[in-house]
Amino acid sequence: MSYRHAVGGRVYRFDDLRTLLGKAGPARSGDDLAGLSAESAEERVAARMALADVGLKAFLNEAFAPYETDEVTRLIVDSHDARAFEPVSSLTVGEFRDWLLGEQASGERLAALAPGVTPEMAAAVSKIMRAQDLIAVAAKIRVVTRFRTTVGLAGRLSTRLQPNHPTDDPVGVAASIIDGLMLESGDAVIGINPVTDSVDVTERLLRLIDGLRLRFQIPVQSCVLAHVTTQMEALGRGAPVDLVFQSIAGTEAANASFGVTLAMLDEAHQAARELGRGENIMYFETGQGSALSAGAHHGVDQQTCEARAYAVARRYRPMLVNTVVGFIGPEYLYDGKQIVRAGLEDHFCGKLLGLPMGCDVCYTNHAEADQDDMDQLLTLLGVAGVNYIMGVPGADDVMLHYQSTSFHDALYLRSALGLRPAPEFEAWLNANDRTALLHAGPRSLGAIG
């Protein structure tokens, strides 16, 4: 089905929903390079006006990647909850925007609606929303998850303590963990990106975090962000695996570029559940441009592909999900303006689909962005009710070589907006003298692993 709209005396025609969403999106370097974005501001306006008139039901009848060959499409179609969708089923995209912004769209109603919203619907409505719209709706939605800490409660902001090291040196990792804990970071997860994707390194780092946790009775959960198969091998050895991690994308082919399938994730989820530690046991990272960079986007714009990744995530009721929004580089999000907009879109779409969304507020060193841009996105996400952000020593990841947010940034946001850490972690902070961590020292703690 094609879509048309006239602007300035010219009629613009869009061949299908996939084309329409690409043309309606904000200017984005990745979509520009892929030839998916509007060729002019006038065409973008025409696409948005045409999109606003599309009924939400249309998204149930048009696949963005082939059903027969794409398991993410099959997941989206086969898991759609028609009963949850019913309250908004008669609306157009434009009317859906108005409904979301209205008083009737309470947090409880939005939570009930989530299983009925497809990723493409979420992406579509986000494309006709201003920044304040994305913030206002996301702020209504609380998605609460629990492991040793409770993340996502109103009035709370958590952090992932990210103690990466360029050689996976346990002493260096321990030093960063001590630094983060002293500055009230780590209540979402202590999560390490290993340099080497090996079972030995994964197990050693997991035992380091777990030993420190047990020694000081800290209510935190650990994760080593190796490939999911590596983590499962470590689990089989008896390593203390808390959260199981995997990077995911919005098409089967893009996930294949990560070396992962839904069957593989199903197996990992089941293995982690058999540990009997709870329902929220998975951790996923995503990012706009991953499908495009793999040539696996099926002509779908990068933000819609990103929203489709959230359908994969919500299958597993994860503890944590975050977009690594500026990490893939300026080829996909060129500057601070594009990164800020993408971060708000990702957070909104994830929350609308029922996910516990965090964000790695970040940029690469060759992007046209700086820390002022990140401060803006950080503050906007705080107002929007983001579940958690990253805590990186000095905001400079010395292993992955990109710029993120620091332990001090989280303290700023909590102070400015009156937010607090997760309740279990806050109780530990209040009840314990953290100087014991300093006295133990990184060499002693690094030896635990």
Image (cartoon, grey):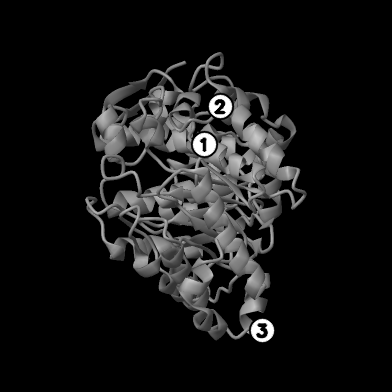
Q: On the picture, is 438 further left or further right than 41?
A: right
**Residue 328 spot, x, y in % from top left:** 34, 44
Nearest to viewer (mark 3 / mark 2):
3
Figure quadrant of the C terminus: bottom right
Q: Residue at coordinates 57% horizontally, 56% vertically from top-left?
A: 206
Nearest to viewer (mark 3 / mark 1):
3
- Mark 2 and mark 1 in contact (Cβ < 8 Å)? yes
Cα separation, mark 3 vs mark 1, equals: 40 Å
Marks 1 and 2, the one that precedes in the sequence: 2
- What type is the residue that disc 3 sits on? Ala
- What type is the residue that disc 2 sits on? Val
Numbered label attached to residue 72:
2
Q: On the picture, is 46 further left or further right than 254?
A: left
Question: Which of 260/316 is in front?
Answer: 260
Cα separation, mark 3 vs mark 2, equals: 46 Å
Cα separation, mark 1 vs mark 2, equals: 8 Å
Is 409 situated above or below 118?
below
Numbered label attached to residue 431:
3
Does dot 1 land on a helix, a strand or a loop?
helix
Does dot 2 land on a helix, a strand or a loop?
helix
**Residue 214 spot, x, y in % from top left:** 66, 68
Is 304 situated above or below 208?
above
Marks 3 and 1, the one that precedes in the sequence: 1
Numbered label attached to residue 309:
1
Q: On the picture, is 269 further left or further right than 7?
A: right
Does dot 3 land on a helix, a strand or a loop?
helix
Q: Residue at coordinates 54% horizontally, 55% vertically from top-left?
A: 204
